[in-house]
Amino acid sequence: MTASKQTDIFSFVSGGEDITITLADIKNYFCANATDQECVLFGQLCKANGLNPWLKEAYLIKYDKNAPAAMVTGKDAYMKRANEHPAFDGYEAGVKVYLPDVGQVEYREGTAYYEDLGEQLIGGYAKVYRKDRSRPYYEEVPLKEYDTKQSKWKTSPATMIRKVALVHALREAFPTNIQGMYDADETPYAADYEGSFREMDDPTPAPSMRGRIAPAPVADPLEDLEADVIEAGDVE
């Protein structure tokens, strides 16, 4: 794939809005260090998954010119894809907690566990329901395989491990709707930014995205990011 023209245009629909981004937009607003090819891959991935980068549903990150760029998808992208599917029928998600005083494991919906009472967080779980399936898609993940003990993993481990389990279950339930999107903690490249990924939700209301948009200045995407990553170089 080549991308030598700054006029490459990517047009698609996201959330009912007509979105247009150009290769120049990607370089100017999202990732100045990215190569033309990486920008094209980012544009194609946004188009394929209906992700709106102006609304921070996707980022292209490259701090080192000698390293491959990474596409980062916001934590809500998975739920957006699932909610758009007519067969989606809800989900349950929570944490797995060990109670040492009684030697038992307890599954709790949500993220509550109480360290001051001696409870130990050991994992997360999720069930995703489809109207056209007789059984839910179930996923359970151990904390020790994902906990970096930094950033959000240090301050909100229950929230993070629950999210990982839910992302896994959503991807299993909707493999064709959530394609090319992986959790940051599942990929080796994300480890290069270990401790830097934090929640990237921005409470600032966004302007209308109808047609071509002149975006507001975008803050550093690693400033507050809990996200999902794939290496741009891995996409064919």
Image (tube, grey):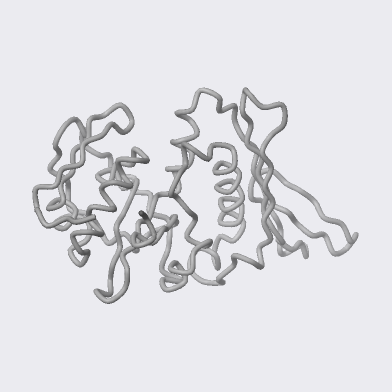
Q: Is residue 87 above or below residue 45?
A: above
In the shown orientation, is residue 219 left or right of residue 87?
left
What is the x, y in percent for residue 15?
Answer: 33, 30
Horizontal placement of 67 versus 75: left or right?
left
On-image quarter of the N terminus: bottom left
> In the picture, residue 98 is in which quadrant?
bottom right
Q: Quick check: 59 above or below 138?
A: below
Q: Quadrant of residue 227?
A: bottom left
57 displayed left or right of 226: left
Residue at (42%, 43%) from the top-left corner?
Answer: 77
The image shows residue 50 at horizontal and vertical percentages of: 34, 38
Task: Pick the residue in front: 205 or 169.
Answer: 169
Question: In the shown orientation, is residue 152 left or right of residue 40?
Answer: right
Residue in front for this viewpoint, 112 or 65: 65
Residue lying at 43% horizontally and 68% vertically, measured from the top left = 189
Residue drawn at (21%, 36%), measured in percent from left and top? 11
Q: Residue 228 in the image: x percent, y percent? A: 44, 55
Count every numbered label the image shows and give the total: 0
Question: Is 92 located above or below residue 156 in the figure?
Answer: above
Which of the pair 118/197 is nearer the observer?
Answer: 197
Q: Quadrant of the C terminus?
A: bottom left
Residue with the most extreme right position = 102
Q: Is residue 160 above or below residue 137?
A: below
**Residue 215, image x, y percentages:** 16, 45
